[in-house]
Image (spheres, rainbow, N blue to C red):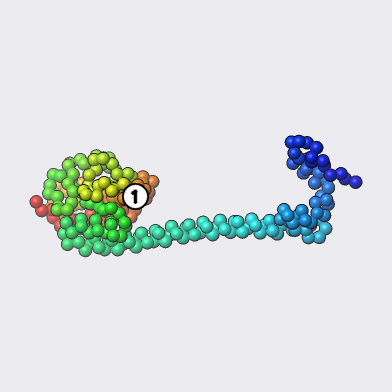
Amino acid sequence: MSVSPDLSADDAGPHWPEIRAWLQANPQTLLDDRSLLEEIGLKPHGRNVVEFGRAALTRLEAAAEREADARKRIEAVARANFAAQTQTHVAALDLMEARNPSDLARRLDGVSQGRFGLAGAVIALEKPGAVPFGWKSLEAGGIDGLLGEHGLTWLGPNFDGLNLFGATEDEVKSVALIRMTPVFPGDEPGPRPALCAFASPEPDGFTPNMGCELVAFIARVVERTAERWPILS
């Protein structure tokens, strides 16, 4: 005849290795206690058989819920990406309808605000040489100073000395800067360093670890569209 272990004798409480050993030596005691089995989520099913249905079902439900949440997050990201791509394509069509360099700058600022919720966007062009009305002028070497000699893009917080966004400069919290090298008809000796700059009112609107494919695409559209017209003095 087996004797249950005295779990109250030790002030420190029961020790699991002792309890486990006792249960291994006296399994029928647990199998016969149906109420205890039900309380811990196990269902007795005949002699020496315990059905783990409730516990297993709980685990399966938890796994299914995690998978559903992950699927919802993936679907939300996919919808957001699709919407952003659609807006980008519509913005590109609007930019390509520009009638002159000044109209191109106006349209770029308009689509950045109206379609992407940004604070604005500008086109900057290095001197020497004429700069179209509505574009920003930069001194020679100014773009290398912002992006580095071989840098193509920069995404991150707004910084002192940029000064590209005029009256909205105070509300600009983060920026995306994309290098351009348009070749204007009749311009010598070749490409002129230029910049497409986007401004966000949110600190995390543009961050260094963010992909820049969409703004870079818009910058390429601006670059190619600007090459339609000569820059007049």
- Whether residue 150 is visible: no
Picture layout, residue 33 above or below residue 21:
below
Task: Kindly identify which residue carries mark 1.
Answer: 202
Q: Quadrant of residue 91?
A: bottom left
- Residue occupying image coordinates x 68% and y 56%: 55
Residue type, mark 1 in image: Glu
Q: Give the side of residue 99 with respect to residue 8, left or right.
A: left
- Residue occupying image coordinates x 24% and y 56%: 109
Dot 1 crowding, Cα within 10 Å, few <14, some 14–19, many 20+? some
Picture layout, residue 129 above or below residue 98:
above
Q: Position of residue 198 (x, y in %)?
A: 28, 51
Q: Give the side of residue 47 with respect to residue 167, left or right.
A: right
- Residue occupying image coordinates x 78% and y 60%: 45
Q: Position of residue 113 (x, y in %)?
A: 28, 57
Q: Position of residue 56 (x, y in %)?
A: 67, 57
> Label 1's element?
loop
- Whether residue 156 is visible: yes
Residue extending farthest to the left is: 233
- Residue occupying image coordinates x 82% and y 41%: 6
Q: Give the side of residue 46 with respect to residue 148, left or right.
A: right
Total numbered labels placed on residues in the image: 1
Residue extending farthest to the top is: 11
Task: Decide which of 184, 10 is in the foreground and name it.
Answer: 10
Q: Give the side of residue 91 with respect to residue 68, left or right.
A: left
Q: Position of residue 137 (x, y in %)?
A: 17, 46
